[in-house]
Amino acid sequence: MTSPFGELTVIVNPHAGKRHVGEEIPELERTLRSRGLAYRLLRTEGPGDATRFAREALEAGGRFLVAVGGDGTVHEVVNGMFDGEGKPLIPDAVLGVVAAGSGCDFIRTFGLPGDATRACHHLTGDNTYPLDVGKITYTTEVGERAVRYFVNIAEVGLGAAVAARAERMSPRLGRSKYFVGFWLTLPRFKLAQVRAVAGRKTYEGSAYLVVVGNAQYYGGGMKISPRSYPGDGVLDVLIFKGPKSDSFTMLPKIYRGEHLPHDHVEEFRVKSELVVEADRPLPIESDGEVLGSTPVTFEVLAQPIQMKL
């Protein structure tokens, strides 16, 4: 049984999940061979490798890329699927995801397995889902503009500060790093004055956090954007206005996706472009990767690639 999309380019981050992903590679390869899938396996050694591998594979005529690891690996592979102008290198290229190591929030929206062996079974056949991709144009530390792409969740403000804090914490904490980082970051994070514009919709006022959702889950299982469907051509925007005391009552509901509607959360949907500015540079993250700061523009690219289900 071969894939209708050709040879799989399997991009593995062996250091993800406290290096547990590396330990799963032999079983991963055995499963691929048992399913009759032709593949080429590439191991990343540092930041940017997965993006480079993805780009080189597509430029060489490949079509089916498989990210093995967590959300960061998926993020890098997706960024290798686009050129500098926001166009896919290969129309309808296929993205497969094998969650391994400490897990992957992105695949939760699709109900895909959270372990490598069962996830490999979903790489066979021709079932795909047309996947939207978000484009972020943000400000770097030196004041230049840069572009990244995301498929899951992006944040401005508190959530990005939490992600930056979690990045510095011990990998022994695993997926709980975000939860611990949140409670360590919240007390010192100051309310910002934000202006968010999407078409005719404008929000001007105080905010701790702006969430831009393509899919639903992040932070180790929080269903932060429960109304998001990553193939509807829309980004869902949530602006959390505070107060900080909301965290004590809202956080348990966020894990269940039951926090909306809420008087202190502004909601709107973006069909083209969202611009976010603030009274101070606010940090930005997407798919768990810390980027730059505001001002930032988010755009939705409707269904430029396919997700393998």
Image (cartoon, rainbow, N blue to C red):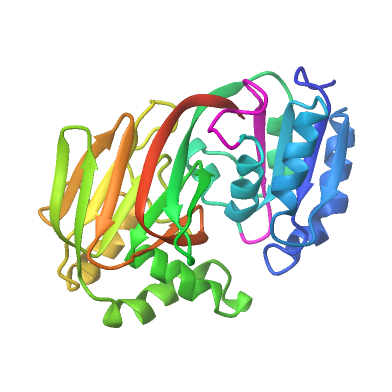
| Residue 239 spot, x, y in % from top left | 23, 53
Reply yes or no: does residue 101 show up in magenta.
yes
Q: Is residue 259 left or right of residue 29?
A: left
Task: Name the residue rendered at 34%, 65% in the picture.
Answer: 282
The residue under the point 16% across, 33% down is: 200
The location of residue 106, given as percent across then percent down, is 52, 46
Q: Is residue 63 above or below residue 51?
A: above
What kind of secondary structure does the magenta stretch mostly adopt? loop
Kindly give the residue lying farthest to the left in the view shown.
Answer: 263
Residue 157, given in percent of the width and then of the height, sits at 33, 64
Magenta region includes residue 301: no
Q: Is residue 304 left or right of residue 293?
A: right
Range of residues picked out in magenta:
84-102
Which quarter of the picture shows residue 79?
A: top right
Residue 218 visible within the image: no
Quarter that holds the C terminus? top right
Locate residue 34: give its quadrant: top right
> Which quadrant would residue 237 be assigned to in this image?
top left
